[in-house]
Image (cartoon, grey):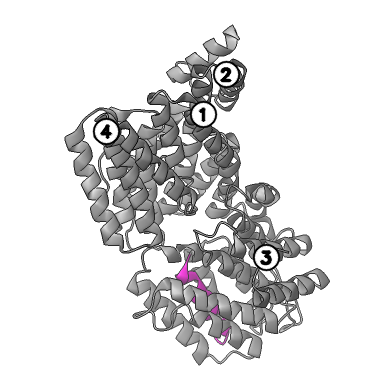
Amino acid sequence: MTNIPACLRVCTLLVLVSLSAACQAPTDQATPAVSDESTLGTVDFLTTCSTEAQPQFNRGVALLHSFWFGEAIDTFNEVLELDPTCAMAEWGIAKAHWGNPLGSSGPKRRPEILENGWTAVERAKALRAKSERERDYIAAVSTLYADHSTTSDGSRSLAYEEAMRALVTKYSDDTEAAIFYGMALNGTADPNDKTYKNQLIAGEILETAFEGQPNHPGIAHYLIHSYDTPALADRAIEAARRYAAIAPAAPHALHMPSHTFTRLGFWQESIDTNLKSADAALADDSAPEALHALDYMIYGYLQTGQDAAAKGVIDRVNALRATIDPKSGYGLAGFYAVAAIQARYMLERGDWAGAATLEVLRTPTPFVDAIGYFARAIGAARQGDQNSAQGDIAQLVRARDALGGNSYWATKVDIQREAAEAWANFAEGNTDVALTMMRNAADREDLTEKSGISPGPIAPARELLGQMLLEAGRHDAALEAFEVTTTEEPGRFRGIYGAARAAELGGKTALANQYYSALLEVAAKADEDGRPELSEARAFVASN
């Protein structure tokens, strides 16, 4: 077992032992019931609610596990129509209002969302649940909302994690408690912790649960989140390849496998599952969920040189962006996707003029606005337009300062600022200064993880360092930088091409041939009259 604090290690062992012994929920009610197994997966969450209401309750929990929050609220309200005394239905509504538990490192949830969640908690308490276990569940979810006007979402997420840890210790045979605890650990994981303490604890719990419940949507979903880092992604392959089949009706379930596919460079699998997810989300009138899928989809298209298809994604985004409801729980994910998709389309293709003139998406969220300023600054600097580059860099400084202190997103924006300043210096001939800044930006980015809101950085800092070293004629150093990126983020077009070009210019013909061949394999479905890098790769491989 991983090197974790003793208190957590004991709790994890208790959970693992109980899960391996029996994959059944406590028997608050004698008759198990499942719902929509073929479309949402199998959930057995026994309650003291009426026998008539139990299948609908299970359906609501399955929806929660696949982050289909609006549908979950509707379903739990249907449970209350069947059994007005079902306090756990109000627990489910409170959980659904909280939304994605991974969102606690970003902006605080809007007041109306928190008020709605707290109101559901109060209704749940007023119904006086019939079992102590159910009252403990309600007490746990209440920690997400208590004193929400004066405390941060992050601090309340930590309180919820602790409450769920106590709950799984108290009810050692409750698999649903263990599953929700696993996701709570992911929600409070430190993005700067490269030991992945929380994720590994969650992974151990969820893997054991998966053995007994292979059709459970939450286990597959949360395993993907647990291992959504380069160092751990291969552990999630089974869950990724099964989740979409477990819950094919849920748009988010169709999208989630692409988190793992992206980490491993399985681009066509990512594209295919996101095509399904975007269509399902649009059928559900969820533009933000569709846009989130489109961000991952265009990322795959761009890595494989399918630029015409990527342009088709841009056209879809332009049609969808006006439909985003900024008050929806997924509004932020939608706005982020719009900004990221347009920036990626320019930067991944090396269209510096297009990047320099990119429209900045102005939102209430500074780190979303920063995406456009970053792309514009890079594009302008690469074209030698110092005035424009400096203006956009100044906007990145403002966005960083607006995010405050050393927060996760403030750090991310400041890395973008430093990378843009490095390229501005490089354009002016300040090569040593530029390389020092670019190395520092790359080192800083290596110390933190990406957010689940994104398939990857808008432009990886170490990849940008490799490009700068290549242009500075430092071929061996460039190759070293690119080889790091091809390991950390396998299958990226610009990383593989950069490594090939650096090896070629450094006289390493055999190695260059390997990288060019790899690029042609990754881009096997590229547009026929596509990028010049592919023509260069074909010519090199043919002559060697």
Q: What residue type is labelled 3?
A: Asn
Local secondary structure at mark 3: loop
Q: Does the magenta stretch include residue 408?
A: no
Image check: 318 left or right of 214? Answer: left
Q: Where is residue 230 in the image (x, y as percent from the top left)?
A: 58, 47
Left or right of residue 233: residue 328: left
Q: How far apart are marks 4 and 3 (CA)?
A: 45 Å
Identify the image quadrant of the N terminus.
bottom right
Q: Give the range drawn in magenta.
A: 84-99
Residue annotated with mark 1: 479
Crowd rating for badge 2 (residues with CA inside 10 Å; few <14, some 14–19, many 20+): some
Cα separation, mark 1 vs mark 2, equals: 10 Å
Q: Do the residues labelled 1 and 2 touch (CB within 8 Å)?
A: yes
User: Sequence-wise, which precedes: disc 3 or disc 2?
Assistant: 3
Give the mark, 1 or 4, whose residue is nearer the N terminus. Answer: 4
Callout 1 amino acid: Leu
* Residue at disc 1, secondary structure: helix
Q: Is mark 2 on a helix, strand or loop?
A: loop
Instruction: Identify residue for label 3.
Output: 3
- Name the residue beneath numbered marker 2: 508
Residue at image position (35%, 46%) is 416
Is residue 282 visible to the viewer in this orientation of the structure? no
Q: CA gap, disc 4 to disc 2?
A: 31 Å
Please name the residue that numbered disc 4 is placed on: 381
Q: Residues within 10 Å of mark 4 (few under 14, many from 20)?
A: many
Residue 523: percent from the left, percent from the top? 54, 25
Which of the two residues, 115 or 441, is positioned nearer the viewer here? 441
Q: In this view, does 36 lie to the left or right of 371?
A: right
Cβ atoms at labels 4 and 3 below 8 Å apart: no
Q: Which residue is drawn at 42% across and 47% down?
A: 291
Q: Residues within 10 Å of mark 1 (few under 14, many from 20)?
A: many
Kindly identify the residue that appears in the image at 49 percent across and 73 percent down: 157
